[in-house]
Amino acid sequence: MIQRVEIPQLPALDDYANVAQLTHKVQELRSEASILAPRLKGRKIWMLNSTAQGGGVAEMLPRLVSMLGEVGVETQWLVMGTARQEFFALTKRIHNLIHGSGEPGFTQAERMLYDLVSREVADQLRPLMGPEDILVVHDPQPAGAGALLKKELGLHCVWRCHIGLDQDVSQTRSAWEFLKPYVSSYDHSVFTAPEYIPSYLSGNVSIIHPAVDPFSHKNRELSTHKLVGILVNASLVAEHHPVVTPPFEAPAMRLQPDASFAPATTPEDFGLLYRPVVTQVSRWDNLKGWEPLLDGFVALKRREHPSGLDERARKALKSVRLVLAGPEPSAVADDPEAVDVLNRLIARFQSLPSEIQKDVALFSLPMTSRKQNALMVNALQRCSSVVVQNSLREGFGLTVTEAMWKRISVLGSVACGIRQQIRHGVDGYLNDAPEDPEAIALALEQLLIRPQERMLYASHAQRRVNDEFLVFVQVAKWLRVLRTVADPRRYSKAPIGG
């Protein structure tokens, strides 16, 4: 099953150029596009991935597709699907192995399943593809289908891998060996970091970092009234005064002591507008470090804090609360582990004493409306004193980029993707022990008791995103990749990315 995703009307480049902070970046993109886009005239670019919602890829594609179109490169977004749900269990295992987690090795039945679904998807894609088109395939799920179209139609194909691990272990070797027959046939590959590239793809490869759109619902500026309105509409804070906008289609749901979920102001307002808040927003994934983070927060609440703290610091440590937020698991079709991860967190929450339970909120954010989901995440991040990304493995980590852009201090792990963004002690704080609750507690304590240092990190972080990780930079690099693939004899030596 192939779904063509219609891109909603998005802001134009002129709208970005009207913002003083963004004017120069827009000018740089337009200058490069004026040279590169005409060389892609007559070709259609197809972006193919496995889900239209949930996760960083689905969030980035609308703006990338729209902006490529605006600079003169016709681009469409397709999503593959299959009724064979065991396929997504297999590709999730590949995903985990690439991140160094799981039992290596694949059976012949798993190879046959992957080939079967790849054939079904390729057959559905075939009528859409023109001889001069370029197919950009994102991540392992559709990689087999792209390889078939490359072989049978001679189609120009790019494989974009958003995941990786900066270690060579049995798990990664197993996953890359499984994928080798498919991805090695592509004209070009794109990775997020040099450390992720398998040796057999070290030739025609580029580095493109993911990027944020400063006008997206998840990243746009929010006035005080708009911020409060979103929190009220999502049932994340109680309505102390009337707001002018209506409630969201579905409220944010909060875990209750009996393991049920209720609107997030139940049994009382959590204090997002009043207290210091530590927040992690991610998919419910084993590799996101959820349980160590929860245990680290518990350790923070129980530890003896340094003597000599001023009254403000003592109050911050006493009143700080933890938010763990992720998408409604049933809405993320390609992530069968989500419910299991969430259930373990629920059990851990239930084991906590009631006085600590009151300081922890686990929010399930509905995906009924992508816009409203993104606004909830935006508002939660802007309410935070510290945004955490405690990933054990992380391909890049756009939640880090989002918080940096909002001038929120970030505590990240030393996972490779996060190291691409945060320079420890400059743009944020990196913890080299994301599975150690005591190390997490100490890092949180240091950030909470030093507000001026926290604000300095946040200021540097926003500048770093402005320079390196905005969508304009990403689009320019994609133009160079597409130009190279369209005419490899002329441009194969041109440097791209980095």
Image (cartoon, grey):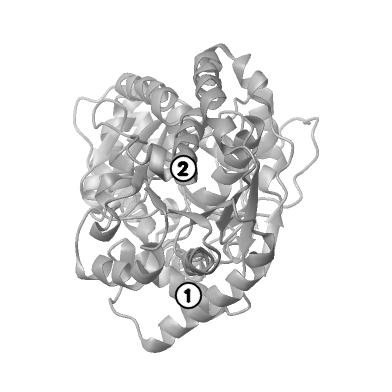
Q: Is residue 173 left or right of residue 460?
A: left
Q: Residue at x 57, y 39 (%)?
A: 64
Q: Which type of secondary structure does the marked residue at label 1 adopt? A: helix
> Circle 2 sits in a helix, a strand or a loop, which is it?
loop
Q: Nearer the viewer, residue 412 or 444?
A: 412
Q: How many marks?
A: 2
Q: Amino acid at mark 1?
A: Ala
Locate residue 219 relative to residue 299 in the image: left or right.
Answer: right
Where in the figure is residue 31, as x and y percent of width and height?
A: 52, 19
360 above or below 426?
below
Quarter residue 456 falls in: top left
Image position, residue 51 (x, y; %): 59, 59
> Left of 482 or right of it: where is 386?
left
Observer able to see residue 102: yes
Task: Determine which quarter of the picture holds residue 330.
Answer: bottom right
- Looking at the image, which residue is at 58% across and 80% down? 84
- Label 1 packing within 10 angstroms: few (<14), some (14-19), many (20+): some
Is the N terminus in the top left, top right, bottom left or bottom right quadrant?
A: bottom right
- Residue 214, image x, y percentages: 56, 28
Q: Which residue does the numbered mark 1 point to in the structure image?
A: 89
Q: Quadrant of the C terminus?
A: top left
Residue depth check, mark 1 versus mark 2: number of the one nearer the observer: 2
- Residue 136 lies, in percent from the top left, at 52, 52
Nearest the viewer among 320 and 138 is: 138
* Closer to the camera in the image, 88 or 173: 173
The residue that label 2 is drawn on is: 487
